[in-house]
Amino acid sequence: MTPLQRDLVVKTSKTQWHRIHATYSFVLDTLDCPFNANQLDRLFGSDGSRGSVFNKHLNQQTRPRFETLEQVDNKVSGTLRYYYSPLWLALFLLEAGEDDWTLLHNRLDLDVASTIFKDKKDDVGSFVLNKINHPIVTELRLRADAQALACLLAILKFKLAKDGNILVSINNLQHAIVDHLVNLNATGYFSHNHHELTVFLVELLNRCHPFIANDKIKEFIEYSVDLIRFKRQLLDTLFQIGLRETYAGEGLRFLALIDISNRELLIKEVNLLRQSTNSRAPFIVVKALNSEFPLAANREKGLLWLISKINSNRGKSDKIKRFIKDDELVLILKDTAQLDVTTWSRLLD
């Protein structure tokens, strides 16, 4: 990421308002402080010289200078990366109808950029889109960062421009974008004004290409906000039963997997498993072979499928272990779980 590149900003842009508020919210939330300009002044202002500069930022009278953000970043690492995230640039491009995708390509991390862009062989420095199909969209959804949302917005913009390389419908892209925003909100990426950001993005997407009737937009947004609350609760439940966030950002991967799972089956199985957590044993027996409520096979996309997908992204020592013991399937989900190699047999993972 190169934050000193040309910054595409329109002073009255709604994207810029959300960008500033979200960034300062990230800073104050990290420090466990209340969100207001006076708090920012006390923490980062200079004696007698800075005055109400942060209030001006929040009211969009002025915008943060790089040097100001750098000072904040010295105390709260990640501030610069948050403010200069490619997500804001993609939103600017969508909101303003701009098409400077070379600028977006240069702002993305290389491994992310290569997912959707490729070098244009006959024009050095220009970029064209890779062929985008449903597996590419799923790959982006499973990424644990906001850059994936920037890529989804870029794909939508190309689709609206009738780029033949995109094999996914506009409607599917719009719903994938809303789902990804919901998951970012549920995992706390936007810790302030996430309701307003949801309203902004849904209305922006609908303006680009209507996919919700005007009289249903409020209802759709309320549903999205309720879904954020539900997913936070579901994530808490998953962590409570031992599916802890081993790697930073894994919560977002959990939620993206839930989106493409058999959600009704998954929730039923999670609730069943939750009933087993009262045991003081260092492991949880989740299924006896003759059980009335066996967990579904991987192909049914329930809890075992979710665990398999999570394991595929974890290191060997962090995988959730599955064993057969006394004809019972056992998942080691708790931190206190110990493996007795003399009594446990038939390792499945």
Image (cartoon, rainbow, N blue to C red):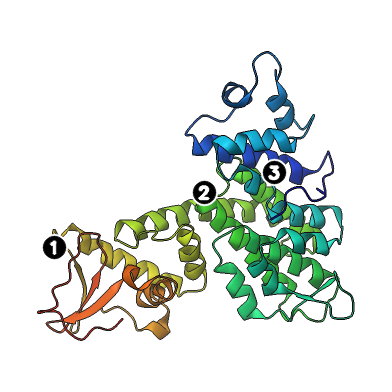
Estimate the spatial distance between the alpha carbons at disc 1 and disc 3, rounded to whole Å. 47 Å
Q: Is residue 186 left or right of residue 40?
A: left
Residue 50 percent coordinates (x, y): 70, 20
Whole-percent x, y for residue 272 in the image:
27, 67
Residue 227 seen in the figure = yes
Mark 3: give few (<14), some (14-19) or many (20+) Cα within 10 Å. Answer: many
Q: Is residue 5 left or right of 37 when viewed as pictured?
A: right
Q: Which residue is mark 1?
A: 281
21 relative to 15, above or below? above
Q: Which amino acid type is marked by label 1?
A: Ala
Residue type, label 2: Gly
Check contact, mark 2 vs mark 3: CB within 8 A: no
Q: Residue at image x 58%, y 59%?
A: 145
Residue 205 lies in quadrant: bottom right
Mark 2 and mark 1 in contact? Answer it, CB < 8 Å: no
Which residue sits at x=59%, y=61%? 180
Whether residue 214 is visible: no
Q: Which mark is residue 188?
A: 2
Q: Report the number of discs.
A: 3
Disc number for residue 19: 3
- The numbered disc on residue 290 is none
Asked whether the residues under the numbered discs 1 and 3 touch, taking CB atoms below 8 Å apart as contact, a structural biologist would say no
Task: Name the residue furthest right.
Answer: 123
Instruction: For mark 1, give the secondary structure.
Output: loop
